[in-house]
Amino acid sequence: MKRRVKKHLPNAITCANLFSGCVGIVFAFQDNLVIASYAIFLAAIFDFFDGFASRVLNSTSCIGKDLDSLADMVSFGFLPSAIMYELLLQAPQTGISIWLNFIAFLIPVFSALRLAKFNTDTRQAESFIGLPTPANAILIASFPLILEQYDGLDRYILNPYGLMSFIIVMCILLVAEIPLMSLKFKNRDFNKNFYRYLLLLFSAILILFFKFAAVPVVIVMYITLSLIQLKFADDTIMSGSHRKSA
């Protein structure tokens, strides 16, 4: 019995991620974007814990990896695109073809490319290449919640040209050859996890004070710290090679 639980628990949590995404899609197309956004956050929690359970129980499998990607495609690919589509419909449509609203569905296309690359790219064992789909989805999920939290931001967030430009930029980041750090802690060594601890600390502070409005800042900070970490890692390697050659 314990062996069966150990084997199937991570996949069960992944299925909960998928279920959350499906429910969120229904709410998104009913124009209940707040509940749809919460569904993305719930799916992200399940996505974290399925990997955590898999590592703790030492229960990895090929089907688990593929199932995780399929669940992520729904929860972090299609669901955020449905939210963006509804936001575009809420934006002023003056002088804009209604067909341009379908640009929102580039998000699942590029998310699929991102997830396919992740499953076959051996470079992504320790870090990510390109923006992870959960990070992109969480950023999109923050928009309806920010609109709910603050009055008067409609003119900025519901700008059709801004939303379309945002979609294009995020799609590029999903497949860009940009190394970004993983938030998986393999040990508690402070020096090796310095940038992860720094990100978590500042994220907690920002979210405490600004709630969902902090999410865009946290995502930008995540990308920035990843690039800084990469820069220092390259400098360390270069200095080490110079010492050896000397």
Image (cartoon, rainbow, N blue to C red):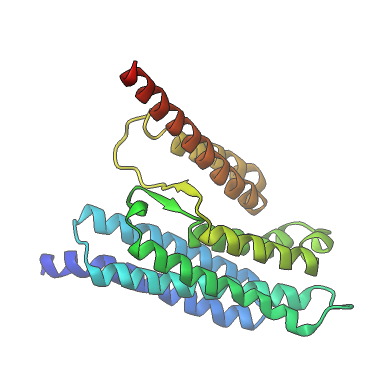
Indicate the position of residue 189 as horizontal and vertical percent values: 32, 31
* In this rendering, position of residue 145 left or right of residue 224: right
Residue reaching furthest to the top: 246
Give how far across and how far down residue 120 sits, in percent: 34, 64
Q: Residue furthest front?
A: 245
Q: Residue at x 65, y 60 (%)?
A: 169
Which residue: 25% across, 67% down? 9
93 w.r.t. 58: above or below: below
Query: Dividing the picture into quarters, in which one does residue 238 lie?
Result: top left
Q: Is residue 76 visible?
A: no
Q: Is residue 52 left or right of residue 21?
A: left
Q: Which residue is drawn at the image coordinates 55% and 46% (left, top)?
A: 223
Q: Is residue 199 left or right of residue 3?
A: right
- Pick the front one: 120 or 41: 120
Q: Position of residue 85 (x, y in %)?
A: 67, 76
Q: Quadrant of residue 137?
A: bottom right
- 34 or 60: which is nearer to us? 60
Image: 60 above or below 178: below
Residue 171: x and y, percent?
59, 64
